[in-house]
Image (cartoon, grey):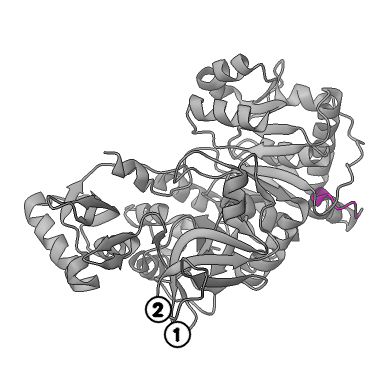
């Protein structure tokens, strides 16, 4: 014990303390205890060694949320190799880019994706381990791979400062970047946000609709429950509202992690009600995008549980500013999580007064080591102890941080900065609106004005009359000059797999 490898603290510590029989994970096909997780991750590490995949080599995990995910993630780390979880919904071109960028030594992926992505992987000559979620032992499959690994494989010693895993940024603003995280960062997020904001305990059951390949979902589903010997239930499929409510009814989780677009979708579902179907639900959290105040308030009144909204990033690994259970202010991201410092600065790196907008910068021990092969971007984002988020924020006189938009998405309208999020929040507060996204568009005089893309709630709406009504509604809520000059009604909005709206794609329309 005490090798510095994160696996020691998250898995082996519980077994050594006599808690090996505790349930760690459950998916639709099976469940696994901490004792068995220790054995299986040792097997996985041994199988990597047997396959000639050594220390620091990257192993891409193109996995859905099943028990294979924690086995492969921790098993790779136990070997001293570097797991690289990526989104299963990426295009073949994006997968090829990431495999090439990280120089993958192997890929672990489900049989169901081999048709769509198999050609890409084969073309690159990367060895594949095929995951069968139901545990079936197929040739070249996950079970066969594990069976070749020694269950007594020794854990690779690691420095707490050694790179443990990579995550790829979600690409809300362009090509994904490989973000390199160290072993000690996982424990730091567990002991700050996990312990002091989420307040997770050994008897909690976590269900995260945000997937484990993403920084937010990784903390929710793996880091936080495993830090205290709690358990997680996995939904492998897309987290559509019906599927999420089914999980809530079946497993009665105590903790739920979602994103704002999902909370909006759940509130629009006819089956939503107290506990969102779980008789034990005590806490909900949100990240990925800022939570509109109206959604938070409605969720509290319908479900009976508050949503703790916060901001995190792939670069910082998890949430670093958050509302707290005893200190909730809807419409804000809350205050810095214990262990983190945050400030707002202007373009000259000077602190801005309360109420003025500037770039949010944050300091904390979970900051990434940097981007892979992106020196200029690394130097821009990671400056000494401070990480520059690229998010525009204000801080009010009471110390609450409020999201305004991505710094490259803020709009200058009539000489005044306008937050797209502020306009979106005003639109969403209208009963006809389910979701909204706002971008800047030039009018006939070449001046930038807000344009809104709106998804409507179910119902019979007069589109022409509704445009005028929504424009008036925004003027009343946030100011005359901020209203959208154009409103386009759409069926869907382009999003990353984690629920972030890709406004740059709307600007290309």
The kind of secondary structure element at disc 1 is: loop
Q: Identify the residue under disc 1.
A: 397
Quadrant of the image containing the C terminus: top left
As for residue 410 lying within the magenta part, the answer is no
Q: Which residue extends farthest front? A: 348
Residue 294 appears in which quarter of the rendering? bottom left
Whether residue 248 sits left or right of residue 110 in the image: it is left
Taking the image as shown, residue 504 lies to the left or right of residue 351, namely left
Give x and y (percent) for residue 176. Answer: 53, 40
Q: Are discs 2 and 1 less than 8 Å apart at CB?
A: yes
Q: Is residue 125 above or below residue 164?
A: above
Residue 324 makes an appearance in the image: no
Residue 124 spot, x, y in % from top left: 62, 18
Quick check: can you spot residue 273?
yes
- Label 2 and label 1: CA atoms lie apart by 7 Å
Q: Is residue 137 left or right of residue 170?
A: right
Instruction: Give the tally of numbered discs.
Output: 2
The residue that appears at 45% across and 46% down in the rendered structure is 172
Q: Which mark is residue 206?
A: none
Question: 437 or 419, which lies in front?
Answer: 419
Image position, residue 150 (x, y; %): 89, 30
| As drawn, 396 above or below 218 | below
Q: Position of residue 174 (x, y in %)?
A: 45, 41
Helix, strand or loop at disc 2?
Answer: loop
Q: Residue at x 12, y 50 (%)?
A: 444
According to the picture, the residue beneath numbered tag 2 turns out to be 355
Q: Which residues are magenta?
A: 2-8
């Amino acid at each position: 014990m005490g090798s510095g490898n994160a696996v020691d603290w998250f898995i082996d510590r519980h077994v050594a303390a006599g808690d090996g029989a505790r349930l760690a994970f459950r998916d639709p096909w099976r469940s696994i205890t901490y004792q068995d997780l220790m054995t299986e991750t040792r097997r996985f590490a041994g199988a990597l060694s047997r396959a000639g995949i050594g220390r620091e080599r990257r192993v891409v995990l193109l996995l859905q949320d099943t028990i294979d995910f924690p086995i492969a993630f921790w098993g790779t780390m136990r070997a001293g190799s570097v797991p690289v979880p990526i989104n299963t919904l990426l295009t073949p071109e994006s997968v090829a880019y990431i495999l090439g960028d990280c120089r993958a030594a192997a890929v672990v992926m489900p049989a169901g994706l081999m048709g769509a992505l198999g050609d890409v992987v084969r073309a690159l000559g990367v060895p594949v381990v095929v995951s069968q979620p139901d545990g079936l032992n197929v040739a070249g499959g996950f079970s066969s791979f594990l069976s070749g690994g020694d269950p007594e494989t020794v854990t690779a010693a690691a420095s707490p400062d050694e790179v443990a895993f990579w995550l790829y940024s979600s690409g809300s603003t362009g090509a994904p970047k490989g973000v390199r995280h160290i072993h000690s960062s996982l424990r730091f997020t567990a002991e700050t946000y996990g312990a002091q904001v989420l307040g997770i305990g050994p008897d909690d059951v976590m269900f995260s609709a945000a997937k484990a390949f993403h920084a937010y979902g990784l903390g929710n589903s793996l880091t936080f429950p495993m830090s205290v010997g709690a358990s997680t239930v996995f939904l492998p499929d897309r987290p559509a509202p019906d599927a999420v409510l089914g999980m809530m009814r079946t497993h009665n989780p105590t903790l739920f992690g979602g994103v704002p677009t999902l909370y909006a979708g759940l509130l629009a579902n006819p089956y939503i009600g107290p506990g969102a179907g779980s008789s034990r639900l005590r806490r909900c959290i949100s990240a990925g995008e800022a939570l509109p105040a109206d959604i938070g308030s409605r969720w509290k009144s319908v479900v009976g549980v508050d949503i703790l909204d916060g901001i995190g990033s792939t670069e910082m690994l998890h949430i670093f500013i958050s509302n707290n259970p005893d200190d909730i202010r809807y419409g804000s991201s809350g205050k810095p999580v214990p262990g983190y410092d945050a400030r707002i600065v202007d373009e000259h790196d000077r602190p801005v007064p309360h109420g003025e907008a500037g770039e949010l910068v944050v300091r904390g021990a979970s900051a990434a080591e940097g981007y892979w092969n992106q020196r200029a971007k690394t130097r821009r984002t990671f400056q000494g102890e401070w990480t520059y988020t690229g998010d525009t924020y204000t801080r009010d006189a009471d110390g609450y941080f409020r999201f305004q938009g991505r710094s490259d998405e803020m709009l200058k309208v009539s000489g005044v900065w306008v937050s797209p999020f502020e306009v979106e929040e005003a639109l969403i507060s209208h009963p006809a609106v389910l979701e909204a996204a706002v971008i800047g568009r030039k009018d006939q005089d070449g001046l930038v004005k807000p344009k809104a893309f709106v998804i409507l709630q179910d119902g019979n709406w007069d589109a022409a009359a509704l445009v005028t009504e929504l424009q008036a509604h925004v003027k009343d809520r946030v100011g005359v000059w901020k209203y959208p000059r154009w409103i386009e009604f759409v069926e869907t909005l382009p999003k990353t797999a984690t629920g972030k709206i890709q406004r740059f794609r709307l600007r290309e329309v």
